[in-house]
Amino acid sequence: MKLYDADYAPSPRRVRLFMAEKGLSDVETIKFDLPKGDNLNEEFATKNPLKKVPVLELDDGTCISEAAAIYRYLEETCYGKPLLGETAVEKAMIEMWDRRIEFAFLVPVFQSFQHGSGIFKDRMTPVPEWAGEARNNAAAFFTILEQRLAESTYVAGEEFSAADITAVVTLDFAKVIKLRPGEEHPNILRWYELMKQRPSYSA
Amino acid sequence: MKLYDADYAPSPRRVRLFMAEKGLSDVETIKFDLPKGDNLNEEFATKNPLKKVPVLELDDGTCISEAAAIYRYLEETCYGKPLLGETAVEKAMIEMWDRRIEFAFLVPVFQSFQHGSGIFKDRMTPVPEWAGEARNNAAAFFTILEQRLAESTYVAGEEFSAADITAVVTLDFAKVIKLRPGEEHPNILRWYELMKQRPSYSA
């Protein structure tokens, strides 16, 4: 299999961290330069009509896009510790936290960055006023995450999971809008240190 | 178990359709009036800190929010035809289409509605300019969906799946921003008729 990847973008990094946690170190990678528009051609559109990375291309040509769908495929086919849960409740809790992080943290961080910086304005129409409001929404998620991490070691419970991957990748990416946890978030900072100590963090 | 539900909102309806497809007809339901703010109290925040419906509360008090996480729990615990796939590739394809619909269709439709109508302006700050741009983004997804449904009977392949539920609920909800498929989308219209014929559609 083959991964269509890019530097800096959060979604491909989610997949790289997931692969590192699963011990997959030898997957062939094609790295796109997104600002240059490597992804904006009709050949790549046959792999993902939304023209976004990551895409995992299987040996038979099947293409899986969306980080969470790649999580699912790798969870089902690779050895290694489960990252999407084992019991029905664990699976639901991980899915729940993964979506909360995506919708209430990753989406607003990403929108704030795109609309505020004007990056990719060749392919979307920035609304600068929305950048500020989206940033407020992303910042509000720190309160939810702090409260959660006061109750549990990891995002979805006492075990490390895919939800921690999505959260730490988003937290790192939030640097682009200068949104960082502070002294008022001791549990986020405690958990962040745990994440940085994992070998997968450098992926 | 018990479902915290609401009329008109797309995410609770996703769960009602999923339950109907699984043959679950006797789940206790607590219906919230969202414009009145039934969901905006601290007691409900203990069930979902984001104060959103749907929430599925299990008999032991465990609360699962986010429609897709409830899909997952019900898939794992209920009889009935699988709606999240059986093989690794099927599971990944359904997850991929479900996320594409959420991120590229449901999120922009919802944002366009909120920011354009000013509904819930007691709890968020509308950016009217973003309403128009989000609507353009949602409209662009029709091209992707039409192309997909020219290739396959259902959204994620030849079998009905959870991705069809998310798609039809979003398509119905898109009426609030007057976004409808037209003659240029014959395959969306063909699939839409299939969806309306399912007994679950009225859920």
Image: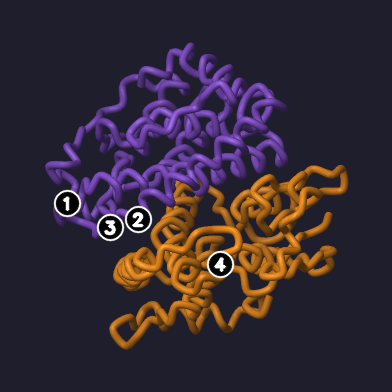
Chain colours: A purple, B orange
Give residue A145's position: percent from left, percent from top. 60, 34
Q: CA gap, disc 4 to disc 1? A: 30 Å
Whether discs 3 and 1 lie on one chain: the answer is: yes
Counting the numbered discs, the total is 4
For the N terminus of chain B, give its image quadrant.
bottom right
Residue type beneath disc 3: Pro
Residue type beneath disc 1: Leu
Q: Chain of mark 4?
A: B
Where disc 2 sits, the SS reads: helix
Q: Is residue A134 visible?
A: yes
Describe residue A163's horizontal placement relative to residue A202 as left or right. Answer: right
* Of marks 3 and 1, the one in the foreground: 1
For the C terminus of chain B, give its image quadrant.
bottom right
Give residue B50's position: percent from left, percent from top. 64, 48
Where disc 3 sits, the SS reads: loop
Residue under label 2: A129
Describe residue A110's horizontal placement relative to residue A104 as left or right. Answer: left
Q: Chain of mark 3?
A: A
Describe residue A5's horizontal placement relative to residue A100 as left or right. Answer: left
Q: Is residue A143 above or below residue A132?
A: above
Residue under label 3: A49
Residue under label 1: A40
Q: CA gap, disc 1 to disc 2? A: 27 Å
Label ID, residue B165: 4
* Of marks 4 and 1, the one in the foreground: 1
Determine the image quadrant of residue A173. top left
Residue under the point 57% across and 54% down: B84
